[in-house]
Image (tube, grey):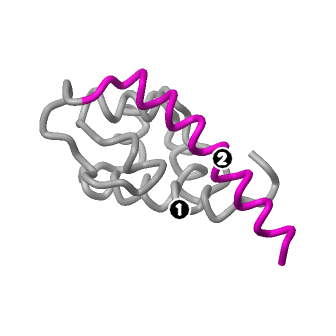
Amino acid sequence: MPSKATKIDLDIAARFRMVREFLDLSGSQMGEVCGLDQSMISYIESGKRELPTHSIKKLYLKHGISPLYLVSNILPMVYQKKTDLSIEDQVNELRVEVELMKINLAQTATKT
């Protein structure tokens, strides 16, 4: 991650924390769900590290948390049926969308 987190990075970090609180999990419990150390959860929530794709996938598979919500704030946060969407397709679309958002943000920043 760049030395300075972008607004997009901070927005994702805030939604990640909201998901943890919604699930009523401690940092270490969230780490177990996401396959990460508790310290990495803290770094992600503070915007110092990016949320790994495998963690997005695990949240979806274990708790039905929408990858679209985490990355783009598209509701709902939780899917009732985990089979509603293809996770691989969602993750691939999100990768492209995040990169496009970062490019747009960088272009906007250079214009001002």
Q: How many badges with numbers are in the image?
A: 2
| Residues shaded magenta | 85-112
Q: Residue furthest bottom?
A: 112
Q: Which mark is residue 11?
A: 1
Which residue is tagged 2?
Answer: 100
Question: In whole angstroms, how far apart are the C-alphas of marks 2 and 1?
Answer: 15 Å
Which numbered disc covers residue 72? none
Query: Considering only vertical position in the picture, is 81 above or below 101?
Result: above
Q: Which label's residue is closer to the chain start, 2 or 1?
A: 1
Is disc 1 surrounded by few (<14), some (14 to 19) or many (20+) residues within 10 Å? Answer: some
Give the answer, above or below, for where 18 lies relative to 78: below
Q: Is residue 73 above or below residue 52?
A: below
What kind of element bears circle 1?
helix
Q: Indicate the position of residue 19 as horizontal and vertical percent values.
A: 33, 53
Residue drawn at point x = 57 percent, y = 49 percent: 44
Residue 39, picture quadrant: top right
**In the visual, does 94 lie left or right of 111?**
left
Q: Quadrant of residue 18?
A: bottom left
Amino acid type assigned to the residue bearing label 2 in the image: Leu
Residue under the point 14% across and 32% down: 81
- Magenta stretch: residue 99 in it? yes
Amino acid of disc 1: Asp
Relative depth, front residue between 6 and 35: 6
Residue 88 in magenta stretch: yes
Main SS of residues in magenta: helix
Q: Position of residue 56 (x, y in %)?
A: 43, 35
